[in-house]
Image (cartoon, helix red, strand yellow):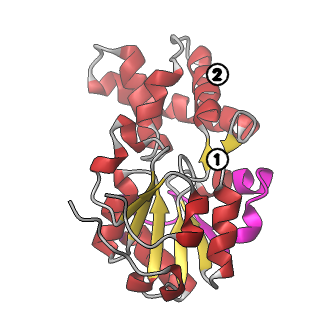
């Protein structure tokens, strides 16, 4: 199959960058906070391999999925009944471990610098709660790259709905067609397609446990550092 071409970075006015799985490997933070939450609830702990495919759809989805896993074969109503307590404990613990068990992926800083060197305005758009996202970016020294940061609680709907991308484009003052979306999952790609934004995905992220190269995207990179010379999707 022929590689699909996308414009040179100089033809974009802005870029929207996902956080978990794209800029920072936060799996360790999630696992620690979730297990502390489960201990508080008197429930068994979960392993990283259980958590990894659940990342990316927001904290509510993550907590409900973990409860469903540890309470199986409980009815959905039983899971929902535990949610409020679980949410409160998770929020408490995550606020204390945020950034402590995570690491910036190689090439991220170089990639963000490349985007800025092309004059692109940058926004971080994640399904993580906004407050947690801002703390994490600051802890990892990435906050200075972004004109604005929007989390999963910033708008009425989360990715893969296109609303967050459209609203972020408005905040950046850029048209969707001239705004590049960078992410790690089908959530990012589906939202970008529906919003009219070109999309490039990293190969190393989470993508709900599925092969990322099976996602409909304009291109893929193994490191954000590749953006400095990016021209076409890999075959």
Q: Earlier in the sequence, mark 1 or mark 2?
A: 2
Q: Is residue 106 magenta?
A: no
Given residues 3 and 14, the one toward you in this image is: 3
Magenta-tinted stretch: 135-162
Q: CA distance from mark 1 to mark 2?
A: 25 Å
- Which quadrant of the view contains residue 66? top left
Helix, strand or loop status at disc 1:
loop
For the question of whether residue 100 can be seen, the reply is yes
Task: Quadrant for the C terminus, please.
Answer: bottom left
Q: Nearer the viewer, mark 1 or mark 2?
A: 1
Q: Is residue 136 magenta?
A: yes
In this rendering, is residue 39 above or below 24?
A: above
Helix, strand or loop status at disc 2:
helix
Given residues 139 and 116, the one toward you in this image is: 116
Residue drawn at x 69%, y 62% is 110
Task: Say which residue label 1 marks.
Answer: 105
Residue drawn at x 60%, y 15% is 39
For the question of whether residue 158 can be seen, the reply is no
Count neighbours of disc 1 (C-alpha within 10 A) and say few if under 14, some if 14 to 19, many if 20 or more.
some
Residue 212 pos. (x, y %) = 36, 46
Q: Is residue 150 left or right of residue 142?
A: left
Residue 214 pos. (x, y %) = 27, 48
Given residues 27 and 164, the one toward you in this image is: 27
Task: Say which residue label 2 marks.
Answer: 36
Count neighbours of disc 2 (C-alpha within 10 A) and say few if under 14, some if 14 to 19, many if 20 or more.
some
């Amino acid at each position: 199959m022929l590689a699909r071409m996308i414009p040179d970075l100089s033809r974009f006015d802005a870029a929207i960058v996902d956080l978990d799985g794209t800029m920072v490997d936060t799996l360790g933070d999630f696992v620690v906070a979730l297990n502390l939450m489960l201990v508080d609830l008197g429930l068994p702990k979960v392993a990283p391999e259980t958590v990894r495919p659940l990342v990316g759809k927001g904290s509510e989805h993550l907590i409900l999925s973990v409860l469903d896993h540890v309470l199986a074969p409980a009815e959905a109503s039983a899971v929902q009944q535990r949610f409020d307590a679980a949410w409160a404990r998770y929020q408490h613990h995550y606020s204390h471990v945020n950034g402590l068990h995570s690491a910036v992926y190689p090439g991220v800083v170089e990639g963000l610098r490349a985007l800025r060197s092309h004059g692109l305005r940058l926004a971080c758009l994640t399904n993580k709660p906004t407050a947690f996202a801002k703390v994490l970016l600051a802890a990892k020294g990435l906050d200075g790259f972004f004109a604005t940061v929007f989390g999963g609680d910033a708008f009425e709907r989360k990715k893969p709905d296109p609303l967050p991308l459209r609203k972020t484009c408005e905040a950046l003052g850029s048209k969707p067609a001239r705004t590049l979306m960078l992410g790690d999952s089908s959530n990012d790609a589906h939202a970008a397609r529906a919003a009219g934004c070109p999309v490039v995905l990293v190969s190393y992220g989470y993508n709900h446990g599925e092969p990322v190269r099976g996602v409909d995207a304009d291109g893929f990179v193994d490191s954000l550092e590749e953006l400095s010379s990016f021209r076409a999707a890999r075959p």
